[in-house]
């Protein structure tokens, strides 16, 4: 009886070691570690991928109070679709604001968030409404 139990334990140990050595993860932690290792390394000299800005969510939280319909319609502020401002002017307007009309956001938004707003606004089309 003891020999049968010993043989079963040894077989289980052998299988566990063999599976571990063969690259099959034995535990969930091992699997998680392997999935992290499996991610391809960035190419040398390549810039790391920047986190994507959810510009519509950011717009809803910061701009929708005055620019209705995600900038497609006038509200307390003008509609943004079809703006005559160029990218640099838009960036400055968002960052610095417009005295008496719009607050500046340079202290509350990161540069990449303001850049995302500029790209979003310049990409708006009348047909989006």
Image: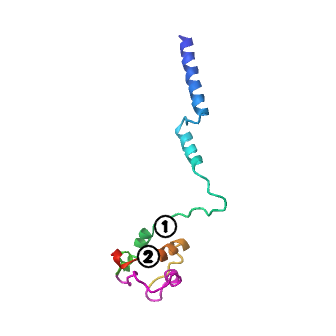
Q: Which residue is mark 2?
A: 123
Task: Pick whichever, 99 or 83, lies toward us.
Answer: 83
Q: Tell me how far mark 1 sits from mark 2, CA to CA.
A: 15 Å
Query: Considering only vertical position in the picture, is 94 above or below 53?
Result: below
Query: Considering only vertical position in the picture, is 35 above or below 5?
Result: below
Considering the whole magenta stretch, tell me its main secondary structure: loop
Residue occupying image coordinates x 56% and y 21%: 11
Q: Position of residue 68 (x, y in %)?
A: 35, 78
Q: Position of residue 120 (x, y in %)?
A: 45, 74
- Total of numbered circles in the picture? 2
Q: Residue furthest left?
A: 129
Q: Is residue 104 visible?
A: yes
Q: Quadrant of residue 30?
A: top right
Task: Pick whichever, 102 or 116, lies toward us.
Answer: 116
Q: Are marks 1 and 2 in contact (CB under 8 Å)?
A: no
Q: Earlier in the sequence, mark 1 or mark 2?
A: 1
User: Looking at the figure, which quarter contains the C terminus?
Assistant: bottom left
What is the span of residues highlighted in magenta in the rendered image?
Answer: 74-101
């Amino acid at each position: 009886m003891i020999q049968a139990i010993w043989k079963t334990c040894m077989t289980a140990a052998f299988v566990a070691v063999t599976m571990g050595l063969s690259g099959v993860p034995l535990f969930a932690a091992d699997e998680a570690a392997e999935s992290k290792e499996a991610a391809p390394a960035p190419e040398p000299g390549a810039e790391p991928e920047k986190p994507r800005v959810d510009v519509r969510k950011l717009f809803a939280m910061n701009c929708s109070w005055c620019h209705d319909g995600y900038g497609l319609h006038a509200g307390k502020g003008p509609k943004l679709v079809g703006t005559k401002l160029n990218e640099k002017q838009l960036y400055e307007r968002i960052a610095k604001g417009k005295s008496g009309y719009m607050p500046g956001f340079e202290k509350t938004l990161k540069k990449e968030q303001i850049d995302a707003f500029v790209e979003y606004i310049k990409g708006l089309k009348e047909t989006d409404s």
